Image (cartoon, grey):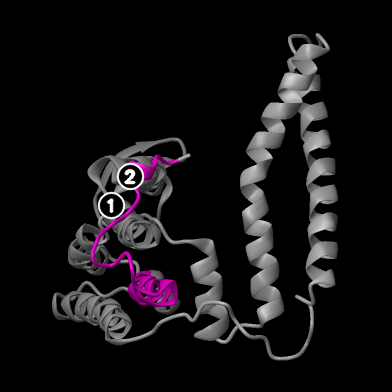
Amino acid sequence: MIPVSTLARGPLSGINPVAKLGAAFLIAIPLIATIDWVSAFTALVLGIPLIAMSGLSWRGFWIRTLPVWIAAPLTAVSIALYGERGGAVHFHWGLMTVSDMSLELAAATFFRVLAIALPGIALFSGVDPTDLADGLAQRAKLPARFVLGALGGLRMVGLLVDDWRELEAARRVRGVADRGRIRRVIGMAFSLIVLAIRRGSHLATAMESRAFGASEKRTWARESPWGAREWILMAAGLAISVIALTVTTATGHLNVILGR
């Protein structure tokens, strides 16, 4: 669990989660459609202010983004060794070939992973699932039944860790926790699946009894606010995409994936 002290408390923390989702999506569009390092690097640099305004502490930032900092270099190395060949060859051994083209693709992949993941993680740090569900239903106009079901399931995910600990403690009490580790993990995993299915069935029954599955238009206990700040954030995400595409086009590095 992330400590409370690492949660975001910045200028963007009170903005509607749907606006954050939209901004992250707008930033990712050119990075998904292109594969050049200039657009990715530009988007990464322009996304730094959004990361700073998210209010996420340095400790919280590194804790949350650690998997990204591990995945990005590993992906870049794989592309550099096994990517498309082109230009001068710098290293060759077996199936591994490092060339100018593979190095350029590796750099593009590295910056793309960072440019897509880091702003998204920062924007969604501290977002309450209930606020997100309210926004998706009221502002994005997604079906209420789907949103509420997803929210209920998401709330149950955190209980899986507690269930695993309880299962482990129960096996220790019976004296069967220290033998046959592979068998123990398989048995605990099966028990956890059974518990999850039972809890999901109980949750579905409870929600149906409260008319969460009704087809009529629902009312909401809390209004999902949307104002100037949300539009400004969306405009910032769009501006980052436009600037990134403009810079890479002006420098002659534009490389559209669909055109390859």
Q: Quadrant of residue 245?
A: bottom left
Left or right, 222 with reference to 20:
right
Determine the secondary structure under disc 2. helix
Q: Work out whether residue 33 can be spotted.
A: no
- On screen, 236 above or below 79? below
Q: On screen, 77 above or below 164?
A: below
Residue 8 belongs to magenta span: yes
Furthest residue toward left: 251
User: In front: 165, or 178?
Assistant: 165
Q: At 78% from the left edge and 9% from the top edge, which residue is drawn?
A: 179
Rendered location of residue 142, percent (x, y) = 60, 83
Q: How crowded is mark 1: few (under 14 residues within 10 Å), some or many (20 or more)?
A: many
Identify which residue, 51 or 162, lies in the foreground. 162
Pointer 2: what residue? Answer: 6
- Dots 2 and 1: beta carbons under 8 Å? yes
Q: Residue at x 30, y 46 (%)?
A: 61
Residue that lies at the very extreme toward the front in this rendered image: 221
Q: Which residue is drawn at 80% across and 8% down?
A: 175
- The region drawn magenta spans 2-31
User: Residue flagged by tag 1: what amino acid is it?
Assistant: Leu
Which quadrant: the C terminus? bottom left
Q: Is residue 199 left or right of residue 47?
A: right
- Looking at the image, is 177 positioned above or below residue 31? above
In percent of width and height, residue 236 lies at 24, 78
Relative vertical location of residue 187 with respect to residue 159 in this rendering, above or below: above
Which comes before the other along the chain, label 2 or label 1? 2
Q: Mark 1 points at which residue?
A: 56
Circle 2: residue type: Thr
Number of other residues with Cα within 10 Å of mark 2, as a class: few under 14, some 14 to 19, many 20 or more: some
> SS at mark 1?
loop
In terms of depth relative to the viewer, which is nearer, 80 or 198?
198
